[in-house]
Image (cartoon, rainbow, N blue to C red):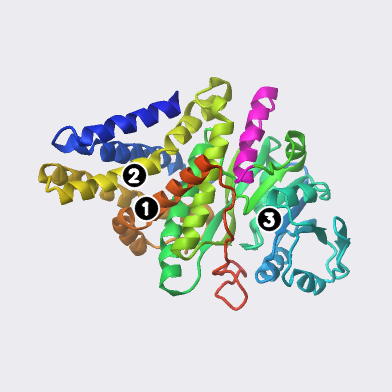
Amino acid sequence: MIHGAVLLLWVVLLARAFGGGGVFAWATGMVYVGYDTVLLGFVAWQSWRLLRPLPQEAGGAPVSLGVLVAAHNEAGILPRTLDALFAQQDPPDQIIVADDGSSDGTAALLSAYGLASPALGTIGASASHPSLRWLRLPHGGKAAALNQALTQVRTEILLTVDADTLLHPGAIGAMRQAFRADPALVAATGVLTPLCGPGFSGRFFEWFQTYEYIRNFLSRYAWSRLNSLLLISGAFAGFRRAAVVEVGGFDTDCLVEDYELIHRLLRFSAHNKRGWRSAVLGRARAITDAPGSAGAFLRQRRRWFGGFLQTQLWYRDMVGNPRYGWLGLAMLPVKAADTFQPIYGLTALGLLFWFLVTGRIGVLLPAAGIMAGKIGIDLSFHLWSVVLYRRWTGDDRGGRLLPAFVASVIEPFTFQVFRHVGAALGWFVFLTGQRNWGTQSRSAAAPGERVKVEAGVE
C-alpha cells in the first residue's frame, strides 16, 4: 500500500503538470524537495549529539576477531589491503583470503606471503604470517566465497573487508572494542572514504562522492539511534559470527548481500526477541576504491539500486509493521518512498526543461525560488555535516568547507543527476530480471597510485 501510494502520487502530480498553471504545475519537484528536506532535518536533529564527546566504550570480556577478504582477480590492490591489515594497532587473530577463482596473479602474490597454493576447495596457512590463510575456491561470486570462509573462521567476531579497502591503523581496534562492550551488537559498519582515479573525471567523482559519503554515514548514525540501521557496508563490516550462522549466512541470490543480511538479522531478532542491534562506528575508518568515471559510476549505482529494490520486495511485509519497532514504522516506509525518489527527481528536472522550452515563466520563476531555498538548506547541511563528521571520526581532513560550499550549489544539476540515472537503470534491470552487472574496474587504489594508510595519513 505504501509503495503503491507513492507511485499513485507521482502519476497524479505528473498529470497536474500538464493540467494547470502556477507553481503547482511543478508539484512533483515541490514534493521531491520537501521530502529530501524533511530527511535532512531528521538527520540534523539526531546527529547534533556528535558535537559532544561520545561516551567511551565500557570494558566487557575479550573477543576474538577474524577478517574475511573475498577476492576475485584483485592482485593489483590485494598487497596493500593485506599490508594495512598487518599494520593494525590491534591486529586480527585470523585473516582469510577467500580466493574466488582468480585467474590473474593472485596465486603468485599470495606465495610472496608464505602461502603455498592449496587444492581447490581447501585452505592453507602461511609460513611467514601466522594469522594468514588462503582459501582457494572455484568462481562462484562474493556471497558464496564469504559463506565458504564463514565455515573456516574460528573467531567470535568476523569482519568482511573488500580487497580494494584499506583500513586505518586503529580501525580493527575500534571494531573489536564496540563488540566487546555491547553483547547485543550483531552488525557494525566502519566509516568509508571514497578514493577515485586520477584525471578530471576521477577528481570530479571523488569530490562529490566524498560529501555524499559524509552525509550518508551521518544518516546511518541518525537511524542507528532508533535501532533502525539497515545499511552496513560490506566493504568494511563487522558481524557477530554466531548470529550470521544462525540466520543462514550470506544470500547468494541477492545483488547486495550485505544489505539483505541486516534485514534478515533484525527480522530474526524481532521474531525471537533477541534484542539485536546494528551500529555505525565513527572511529573505525577506511579508504575504499570508488568509481571515477561516468560509466563505472552508473554501473555501480545500477547494481546497488537494483539490489535495493530486490531486497525491498523480499522484505515488504516488514514495511509499516509495528512488530519491528521504529524499523518497521519509520525506516522501512522511508525506504519504500526512496524506491521512487530518483523517478521524482528526474521528473522534476525534466519538467523544468519542458517549462523552459514552452516558455511557461509563471511556473519557472517560483520554481527557481524554491530551488534557491533548497540550495541554501543543502549548503547549511553540507557545512554542518563536515563539522559533525570531523568531531565524530577524529579525521580533521574529512571534507573541506570551501569545496563543500561549491558542491552544494552545483550538485543538484550534475552529480545528483548521475545518481538518479543510475537508480533509474537499476529499476530497468530489476524489472527485466537482468543479472549481468559488468565488471567494476579499480581506478584508484592500485600500486603506484596515491594511497597511503600509515599513522592516519591518507
Q: CA distance from mark 3 to mark 1?
A: 33 Å
Which residue in the structure is indicated by mark 3?
172
**Quadrant, the N terminus:** top left
Disc 1: which residue: 416
Q: What kind of element bears circle 2?
A: helix
At horizontal 69% and vertical 27% (from top left) the residue drawn is 274
The amino acid sitting under disc 1 is Gln
Q: Amino acid at mark 2?
A: Gly
Distance CA(mark 3)–CA(mark 2): 39 Å
- Label 2, on which residue? 345
Is 45 rendered above or below residue 53?
above
Give whichever of discs 1 and 2 has the lower sequence position: 2
Residue situated furthest top in the rendering: 322
Q: Which residues are magenta?
A: 254-277
Residue 345 lies in quadrant: top left
Taking depth in this image into account, of 88 and 302 the one nearest to the observer is 302
The reply to whether the C-beta atoms of the residues labelled 1 and 2 are less than 8 Å apart is yes
